[in-house]
Amino acid sequence: MPGVGAGPIAGRVLVVEDEAALANVLVTYLEREGFEIEVCGDGAEALARASEREPDVVLLDLGLPGLDGVEVCRRLRTFSDCYVVIVTARVDEVDRLIGLAVGADDYVTKPFSPREVVARVQAMMRRPRVRRDVAPAADAGSTGVLEVGSLRIDPDARETSVGGVPVDLTRTEFDVLAALVGHPRRAWSRADLTAEVWGDDWFGDPHLIDVHIGNIRRKLGDDATEPTFIRTIRGYGYRLGPCA
């Protein structure tokens, strides 16, 4: 379902929503902004289409029949680094945290403004993107590699390792960690770190950054009570350190 207009495609969006009326509203608003849209209401079909079409963003309803949105997101992350925005009617915070823990980047709750969803998608598309099938430049290994203690980040290849062991981060998790490692002595407020990763015009849950930090710590094996890499600054935000 191509975007409306003769201009360049703003991006590819897969809308996974079993409520046809809501899906149609999202399609209408996204197409007006030049996005190419695919729609499906089934989790298994969503995974198949994501594999075939390689969308830039997936708007994923949690309450799908059969294979639910959490499991779809979990499986999606095994082959795709697209942005995932959870769209849910579930008001329980646990549901949102589970979705973010398995690899989602953001969430919106029903009822919502379609313009808000479009704004979230547009903000994500403004972030730099490196596709998995694009190899880094030949000299990437000699430039920009960040190392702090046993932690190593290669921004060009978008690779992370601890003690030589690869760490599989989502795109958002990588961007958060890269910001911290890139400024190892800086204390980041939550607002500043969010703006660094999502952009100044992002709006949403201000505690979203805390969830991503928690996921990064878990993947790095970093104990929040005795941190090796990411230290919490109470009442303010985060900074890198202390590091071994």
Image (spheres, helix red, strand yellow):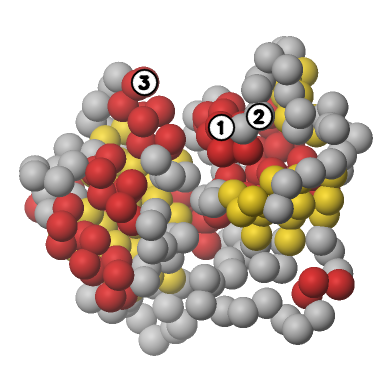
Residue type beneath disc 1:
Arg
15 to 197, vertically: above or below: below
Instruction: Say whether marks 1 and 2 touch (CB < 8 Å).
Output: yes
From the viewer's perspective, is residue 226 above or below residue 67?
A: above
Residue wearing tag 3: 93
130 lies left or right of 117 = right
Residue 104 appears anywhere in the view: yes
Query: Dot 1 corresponds to which residue?
Result: 218
C-alpha span from label 1 to label 2: 6 Å
| Alpha carbons under labels 3 and 1: distance apart | 19 Å
Q: Where does residue 199 sit, x and y in percent of width and height? A: 65, 49
Residue at left offset 91%, top offset 35%: 185
Q: Earlier in the sequence, mark 2 or mark 3?
A: 3
Residue appearing at x 53%, y 72% in the figure = 131
User: Left or right: where does residue 144 sit relative to residue 42?
Assistant: right
- In space, the residues marked 2 and 3 are separated at their CA atoms by 24 Å
- Amino acid at dot 2: Asp
* 229 relative to 74 in the view: left or right: right
Mark nearest the camera among 3 and 1 is: 1
Q: How many marks?
A: 3
Q: Residue at x 73, y 23 (%)?
A: 227
Residue 154, relative to residue 165: is it above or below? below
> Residue 51, located in which quarter of the rendered image?
bottom left
Mark 2: secondary structure: loop
Q: Quadrant of the N terminus?
A: bottom left
Kindly identify which residue carries mark 2: 222
Q: Are marks 2 and 3 in contact (CB under 8 Å)?
A: no
Q: Residues within 10 Å of mark 1 (few under 14, many from 20)?
A: few
Figure quadrant of residue 35 = bottom left
